């Protein structure tokens, strides 16, 4: 049972893109970045001289989920860079983890020198993890469209979905800790943000989000200097990426 739970935790499922999202991806310059055993699909829109913004999708998401935001950013003269995480979207497939995802974010930030970031959902975890490990990476503006906090909560959700016992859950955590050489109890966005070099951060979270409780974003913001949180309604966890007033808030904060 621990193996079943482990496979589920490290094997993201594919979600289909909408027709509009596929069209936006087709408009991008595309290439593959070699990272370990993965070919990471990269995307770029906009003029080379425009200011860069990096977009980081959530777990089981992909770059195309940002289609509406990408169009809004291009209309405001930004160069947009995005990617499909390891085993996500059009990148190659295989077992992956928070840590590998974070290393990909780190590599992209170091290569492209983006000073502005937007993440959705789980994308905030590998991004803040990468920034906490490299305070030399300076970020001017960072918007998190919802964020989880503690890694243990993800394990709890997984345990509930597959019906495993506390003993099996403990075995799962022990396996992850042994493989990654970490203490799972220290893995939280609230901890990561305290050493991240971010000048200004904004978290936008729907009060009725059924995927990630707004309480998690509140804890993260309370632990983060120079962070503000905007609590909204009537968007949910995924429609937040396509809601005009949210996209306008993102652009306004970036400017």
Image (spheres, rainbow, N blue to C red):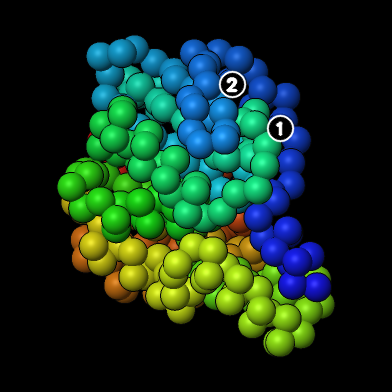
Say what secondary structure mark 2 lies in: helix
Q: With respect to residue 86, does 221 lie above or below? A: below
Asked if the residues shown at circle 2 and circle 1 are in contact, with their CB atoms under 8 angstroms apart, the answer is yes
Residue 175 percent coordinates (x, y):
61, 71
Which picture quadrant has residue 61?
top right
CA gap between label 2 and label 1 equals: 10 Å
Q: Is residue 185 or residue 21 the one in the foreground?
A: 185
Residue 144 percent coordinates (x, y):
42, 52
Q: With respect to residue 174, does 131 lie above or below? A: above
- Marker disc for residue 200: none
Q: Is residue 224 or residue 238 the one in the foreground?
A: 224
User: N-terminal of the two: label 2 or label 1?
Assistant: 1
Residue 201 visible in the current orientation: no
In the rendered structure, the answer to whether residue 150 lies left or right of residue 73 reads right
Q: Residue at x 67, y 60 (%)?
A: 9
- Marker disc for residue 25: 2
Residue 88 percent coordinates (x, y):
63, 39
- Give the labeled residue for mark 1: 17
Which picture quadrant has residue 27?
top right
Q: With respect to residue 163, does 210 lie above or below? A: above
Say what secondary structure mark 1 lies in: loop
């Amino acid at each position: 049972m621990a193996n079943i739970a482990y496979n589920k935790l490290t094997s993201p499922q594919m979600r289909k893109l909408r027709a509009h999202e596929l069209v936006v991806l087709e408009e991008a310059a595309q290439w593959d970045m070699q990272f370990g055993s993965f070919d990471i699909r990269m995307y770029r829109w906009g003029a080379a001289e425009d200011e860069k913004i990096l977009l980081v999708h959530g777990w089981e998401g992909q770059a195309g989920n940002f289609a509406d935001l990408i169009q809004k950013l291009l209309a405001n003269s930004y160069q947009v860079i995005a990617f499909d995480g390891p085993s996500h979207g059009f990148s190659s497939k295989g077992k992956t983890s928070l840590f590998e995802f974070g290393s990909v974010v780190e590599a992209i930030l170091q290569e492209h020198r983006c000073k502005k970031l937007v993440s959705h959902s789980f994308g905030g975890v590998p991004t803040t993890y990468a920034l906490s490990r490299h305070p030399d990476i300076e970020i001017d503006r960072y918007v998190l469209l919802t964020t989880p906090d503690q890694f243990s909560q993800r394990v709890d959700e997984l345990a509930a979905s597959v019906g495993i016992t506390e003993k099996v859950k403990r075995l799962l955590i022990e396996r992850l800790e042994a493989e990654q050489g970490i203490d799972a109890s220290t893995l939280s966005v609230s901890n990561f943000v305290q050493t991240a070099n971010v000048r200004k951060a904004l978290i936008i979270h729907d009060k009725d989000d059924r995927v990630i409780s707004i309480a998690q974003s509140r804890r993260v913001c309370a632990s983060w200097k120079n962070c503000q949180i905007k609590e909204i309604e009537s968007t949910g966890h995924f429609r937040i990426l396509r809601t005009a007033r949210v996209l306008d808030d993102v652009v306004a904060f970036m400017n």
